[in-house]
Amino acid sequence: MSTSNAEDARAAAIPATATGPPRPTSPRASARSMYLLHHLLEPNAGYRRLAAWLEARPRLRHVFTAAEKGVKQEIFGCRMCGQCALPSTGYACPMTCPKQLRNGPCGGVGSDGGCEVYPQLRCVWLTAFERADSQGRSADLQRLQLPIDHRLWGESSWIQYWQGRDEELWTDAGAALLPGPGASGS
Amino acid sequence: MTHVATPGRFRAVLESGAFTVTAEIGPPRGADAGAIVRKVLQLRDWTTAVNITDNQGAAVRLSSWAGSLAAMTAGVEPIMQVACRDRNRIALQSDLLGASAMGIPNVLVMTGDHPRFGDHAGAKPVFDLDSVQLLWTARTMRDEGKLLSGRELDPAPSWFLGAVENPSAPPADFRAARLAKKVAAGAQFVQTQYVFDAAAFGRWMSQVRDLGLHERCHILAGVGPISSLRALSHLQERVPGVQVPAELARRLRGVPAERVADEAMTACAETISELRQIPGVAGVHVMAVGNEHRIPAILRLAGLNEVGAAPQRDMAGLSEVGGEAGAAATAGRRLARADATRGGLGGSSPRGNAGGSSPRGNRAHAG
C-alpha cells in the first residue's frame, strides 16, 4: 500500500459521521439489540400510513429524514444511500466500505482483518459477517444485493422500507447453492 | 491436452476435464499493441488462454478490450478482465457488448483495486456495481437478452463468464460461501488470488466441494513465482489479502541473491504439482506480470506439457488488424520457440533481465 501509517491514523481518527470518502465503520450498538429493535420497526399498516403521510409533506419529510440521518450516522456511520441494507448485514453498513460493496468483502482484506484501503480499520464486511453469524443470520449475507438507485441518496430509507419498496433491493438467488434454510426475511 | 483452435477453446478444454493452464499479462503503459503480441506469444504454446488485465493495481495501462483484440491477432485466446472500479453500469454494459461483438470469448469480472494504490491516487472510485452485481448483470444480458434497465438486446451477447476469489483472505469461513454467491450470480469459472500454501487452499477446496461448487464452476488456482527478495517484501508487507507462508519466505531468503528467481520458479512448480492433486481443481492461473518469460520453464518443471500452438491469426476474422503486430507476432513466436528449446530453469529468455519487477502489478484479483 502506498499510504503512510500517519495517513491511516489520521483517517482512522476522523469520526465516521464526517463527510468524505467512505471508511469502514463498526456499529456502536450490539447486533442483538439491533435485531430486536428491528422487530419494532417492521412495516405494518400504521408505519405504512405514516410513511405515505410524511412523503406527501416536504417539510415534515425533511425533518424526519434529518432525524433518521442523525440516529443512523451516529450508530452505523450511515451515509444516507436511501436503500438500507443493514438488516442483511448484521447491522454493519456496507456503504462505509471504501468500495461500497453490497455483496461481501473484496479480496484485499488483510490477514489481521484490516481494510485494504484503511489497514488500521477493520473490514466492515468482516464485522458484518461476525455480527450476523453471532445471531444465526449468516445466511442473510448470501442474498444477492442488486445495484442501488443513485437517485435515492439523501432520502429516508425508512419511508422507502415502510412502503415496501426495499423488496426489490435483493434476491434470494445467492442462497440457492447453500445448505440450510437460505436467507430469512428481514 | 485437448486442443481446439477456435475461440471458445478455453471453455472447451475446461469442459473436457483436462488440467487447464491460463496466465496473465499486463498491457503496456503506452500505445503499443505489439507489446501485447510479444508477451502472449511467449505463452501461446503453454497456455489455453491469457488474461489481459484491466488497469491492474489501479495504474493506467492500455485497455483490456484492446489488449484482448491484440492477443487474438496473435492467435491467443484472451480472457478480458473487467474491473468495477473505473466505469459505471452504462459503460460496463457497453464494453461487455463491445467485447462480444468483437469475438472476445471470455470475460473475467472483478471489483478491482482501489484507486488510492494506483498512479492516479486522486481518481474518483466508481464502484457503481460490485463484482457480484456485474456478474449477475452480464448473465442477464447474455441469457435473457436484457440490460439492467430491462431494455432488450438484439442480438444478445455471448461470453464465458469468470470471477475471482481470494481463498486466503478473511473471513476464512465465508470465502467458499462467497464463491457460491458468485456462482449463483453467473460465474462459470473462477481464478483465485495467489496460492502459496497448497494445504490451506486444499481446506478451502474441501468447503467448495461440500457446496458442490466445483461441479458448477471451473476452479483455477492462482500461482506465481516470487522472483526477488524485493518482490517478497512487497508481497508480505504491501499487498493485502496475500499470505506468503513463513516457510517459503525462509526458503527464498536462504539462497544466494542470484538464485532467488530460480528457487521461486521451483517453489511455484512444486505448488502447481500439489494443486493438481487436489480434487476439483480444474487448472492453474499463472501470474508473473513482468516475468512472463519464466512461465514456460515453470510449467515444464511442474511436468505440464505444451498445449500445442494454435494456427496463427485465425481467430474471429481479425487477421487484418495491424500488419506490424502480425510481424511482431512472427518474430516473437520464433523467440518463444527458441526459448522453449533452450529448456531448463536458468535458461535466460530474450527478456531475461526483467526479474525483480514488483508483484504489485499482479494484483488484479481484489474480489
Image (tube, grey):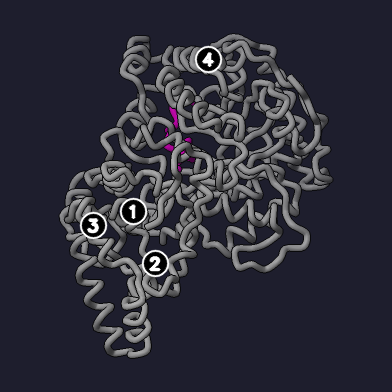
Prevailing secondary structure of the magenta residues: loop
Q: Is residue B219 above or below residue A74?
A: above
Q: Amino acid at mark 3?
A: Leu
Residue B235, given in percent of the width and then of the height, sits at 36, 30
Circle on res. B269: 4
Distance from the alpha carbon under mark 2 to that under mark 1:
15 Å
Residue at mark 1: A97
Q: Chain of mark 4?
A: B
The front one of B217 and B76 is: B217
Image spot of residue B120 (x, y percent): 41, 54
Look at the picture and state if A69 lies above or below A96. below
Q: Quadrant of the N terminus of chain B?
A: top right
Task: Report the Cα–Cα distance between label 2 and label 3.
Answer: 20 Å
Image position of B97 (left or right of B292): right
Is B137 placed left or right of A102 in the picture? right
Mark 1 neighbour class, 10 Å CA radius: few under 14, some 14 to 19, many 20 or more: many
Q: Label for residue A36?
A: 3
- Judged by depth in the image, the label closer to the viewer, 1 or 3, is 3
- Residue at the (72%, 21%) spot, across then down: B307
Residue located 23% across and 57% down the image: A36
**Disc 4, SS:** helix
Q: Given the image, what chain letter belongs to the residue carrying mark 1?
A: A
Q: Which residues are magenta?
A: B354-367
Looking at the rendered structure, the secondary structure element under dot 1 is loop
**Host chain of mark 2:** A
Q: Is residue B65 above or below residue B162?
A: below
Q: Amino acid at mark 2?
A: Gln
Residue at mark 4 shares a chain with residue at mark 2: no
Q: Earlier in the sequence, mark 2 or mark 1?
A: 2
Name the residue nearer the viewer: B219 or B50: B219
Residue topped by disc 2: A83
Judge whether residue B335 can be spotted in this image.
Answer: no
